[in-house]
Image: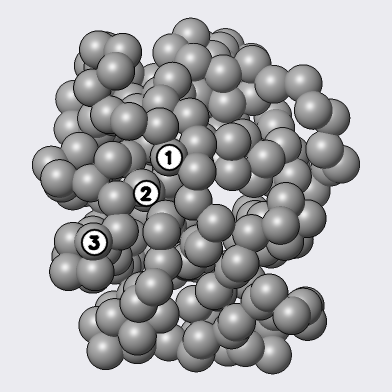
Amino acid sequence: MALLFFFVLYAVGLAIALGHNGHRSRVLRSGEVPPQNPTRVLIVGATGGTGQQLVAQALERGLTVTALVRNPSRLRVEHPRLTVVQGDVLDTTSLEAAMQGQEAVLSALGHKRYFHPTRILSEGTGNILRAMETHGVRRLVCETSLGIGDSAGHMGLYYTLLVIPLILPFYFWDKTRQETVIAGSTVDWVIVRPAALTNGTRRGRLRHGGRVGSLVWTVRVSRADVAAFMLDQLASNTYLQAAPGVA
């Protein structure tokens, strides 16, 4: 019983820390930033679940896409408007090469090194931001997760008390650093915080904003819907310098 008590105490403490260290959105005054309509985009994390949806849907929308991937064989897409660049966000040379000529960046960066501390997300995102500033790329749309910053606890009790503290504490802690790096940058950014991700089909109906998720129940959203929402943010200032939840 004592062990259970201390575990719950740890889980709640972790949720509070993730809330304290993640980004807390501010309201951007309308008209501060002129609207953009980028046509050339770099997609980072293009072989992951959300990343593959970003590539497919960006091409559907007529965008010219560059995909930065560590293993090109994992991206089974061929298209005249798709360029695949082999590289890594931790390798600044390949990242700089992929950034040339881009007008916006979509990041679905992730990894599966869950069980020990890493800085892949935060350091990789820092490299992305420095490359963007070097090449004059203004817009970044980056996927993180509910459960961070002012969305802490909003993935529901199953994630707050079990999944995050048992499996993903290091991963989520690095996501808080990732959000902090983005929020401290000079680019025009949007952080997108999805609920628990699924491989379901695109519904086209989303709840988004600052009151998404639940403190009790697990809320889910398809990667296809998240990708569509991220692409919408390329030309929208609605959530500029904010971190909307999506479900």
Q: Residue at x 42, y 55 (%)?
A: 104
Q: Nearer the viewer, residue 208 or 80?
A: 80
Find numbered disc 1 in the image and state the secondary structure of the residue it sits on: loop
Q: Which mark is residue 140?
A: 2
Using the rendered view, name the quadrant where residue 243 is placed: top left
| Residue 176 visible in the displayed image | no
Residue 122: image x %, image y %? 25, 58
Q: Residue at x 48, y 9 (%)?
A: 211
Q: Residues within 10 Å of mark 3 (few under 14, many from 20)?
A: some
State the separation of the CA atoms marked 1 and 3: 14 Å
Q: Nearer the viewer, residue 185 or 12?
A: 185
Q: Residues within 10 Å of mark 1 (few under 14, many from 20)?
A: some
Residue 225: image x %, image y %? 72, 37
Q: Residue at x 49, y 51 (%)?
A: 38
Which is closer to the viewer, label 2 or label 1?
1
Check contact, mark 3 vs mark 2: CB within 8 A.
no
Circle 2: residue type: Leu
Residue 47: image x %, image y %? 63, 71
Find numbered disc 2 in the image and state the secondary structure of the residue it sits on: strand
Query: What's the image's color scheme?
Result: one colour
Residue 111: image x %, image y %? 47, 66
Circle 1 residue: 36
